[in-house]
Image (spheres, grey):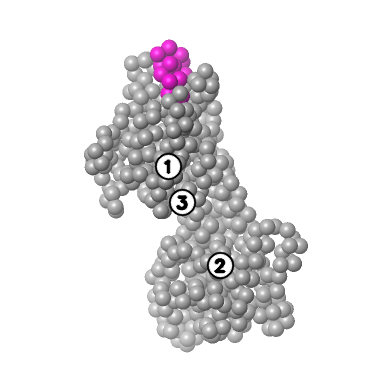
Amino acid sequence: MITLNGNNLTIEQVNRVLFDNEKIRIEERSMEKVIKSRSAVEKIVSSHKITYGINTGFGKFSDVEIDKKDVHALQLHLIRSHACGIGDPFPEVVSRAMILLRLNALLKGYSGIRPILAERLMVMVNEHIHPVIPQQGSLGASGDLAPLSHLALVLIGEGEVWQGRKRIHAAEAWKQIGVAPITLQAKEGLALINGTQAMTAMGVINYLQAQKLALQSESIAAMTMEGLHGVMDAFHPAIHEARGYPQQIAVAERMRAILHDSKLTTKQGDRRVQDAYSLRCIPQVHGASWQVLDYVKEKLEIELNAATDNPLIFDDGETVISGGNFHGQPIAFAMDFLKVAVAELASISERRIERLVNPQLSDGLPAFLSQQPGLQSGAMILQYAAASLVSENKTLAHPASVDSIPSSANQEDHVSMGTIGSRHAYQIIQNARRVLAIEAICAMQAVDCRGAFGMSSATGACYNEWRSLVPAITEDRSLSQDIEKLSDHLLSGKVQKAII
């Protein structure tokens, strides 16, 4: 059971809620803060004090005063009008993450919601009531307005939720668990949608997948080292300590651990003095990507516990301030940085693939790893496929955060586009995983030629696991399904303990 209080949620805890289906509860002291901030909203409504989003319109309409009798209707209109997301829905797990993160932000007690709203969000997580949320339509400032409005629709019994692979009406989902939808009151609609939880939820999924892939890339690269009789001296600790980057040092250490008992790797001068960069610089390149992962984790864990509503209520309601914590620039930068880091893992992987299949570079391996070069093409087109994915990643890696298009009649004149960045990062990760699956297929074929009995215990364990999914290429066949099978396995499988 994970206890939420708005202050110390970690990525590891989010992972348990998302993938281990661990239930959540609300800390009592946090609910007390929620109650206090709600009292402040009710005082504002009763006193007719003009306060943005409570008794005014939104965006450019912030100067339009709303009559006391209409403050509840204002919130309903807000959610319905802003729920204009388009395109394919986010993966269901992202929807689940959005609920969790929005609840955690509201529990900081700065947003003025009623306790029942927090409790309903908790029910949505614990009962797996996951909204269907279109991916496109957010500018990443003023909050992820469109995606979060689709989340809010479900609370009022509108919109759709996932039920297995089907989509059902939200009202039906509430009926199935014997709970009635709620009616939003003053400020509650705004409190639900002013936030960065779409880009951050997608960002957490991206980080978790990228972290796993970065570890898996090391075991795959190690297998390629064996297939190419790679020179182990490049991983000597003295080299990496001389430069000083902790992540580079750690990658080199893991590479040594993975390959410590391999009979297929070589030493400096055995077959050659040094390898090409795609082998020799694994710690430097992969280590740099790990630096980015560490940066991204730091920013995400701040954002998981951030108040991103507007306005925010302080001093038991004495101070209500309109600001811009909903602006997604920190996460936009983090996602753009992550895109580059993961794209580079795929880029260097593709160069290792080329060395495995190119007879001029592969130290005696059959051309294109073919059993009958010429008559059979072997792994030739695997490199083409990898090159295509790497090229696509270069396009997707263009930073979303450098773009901004003003909205709401220029009241909201600079936006982050962070949700676009997080979506593109997700696509890059899926492409990179397929590239690494291709490298693994080629590396297995190469070690078959060298003698798989000489593999290290760590790479041998991976080989046995992956060979059960992808048989050796003894004769030309369509390899499309093999790539997808191994890619799916990398996504769902656990990282070999020997690799860590």
Q: Name the secondary structure under disc 3.
A: helix
- Find the magenta span and give its range: 37-51
Q: Which residue carries the number 1 mark?
A: 100
Q: Earlier in the sequence, mark 3 or mark 1?
A: 3
| Residue 303 forms part of the magenta stretch | no
Q: Position of residue 163 (x, y in %)?
A: 28, 49
Q: Specify whether 94 is left or right of 350.
A: left
Q: Earlier in the sequence, mark 3 or mark 2?
A: 3
Q: Amino acid at mark 1?
A: Leu
Q: Name the secondary structure under disc 2.
A: loop
Q: Which residue carries the number 2 mark?
A: 499
Q: Is residue 105 above or below residue 56?
A: below
Q: Residue at x 70, y 57 (%)?
A: 245
Quarter residue 341 falls in: bottom right
Q: Which residue carries the number 3 mark?
A: 15
Q: Position of residue 166 (x, y in %)?
A: 27, 51
Q: Residue at x 73, y 62 (%)?
A: 241
Residue closest to the eye, 313 or 137: 313
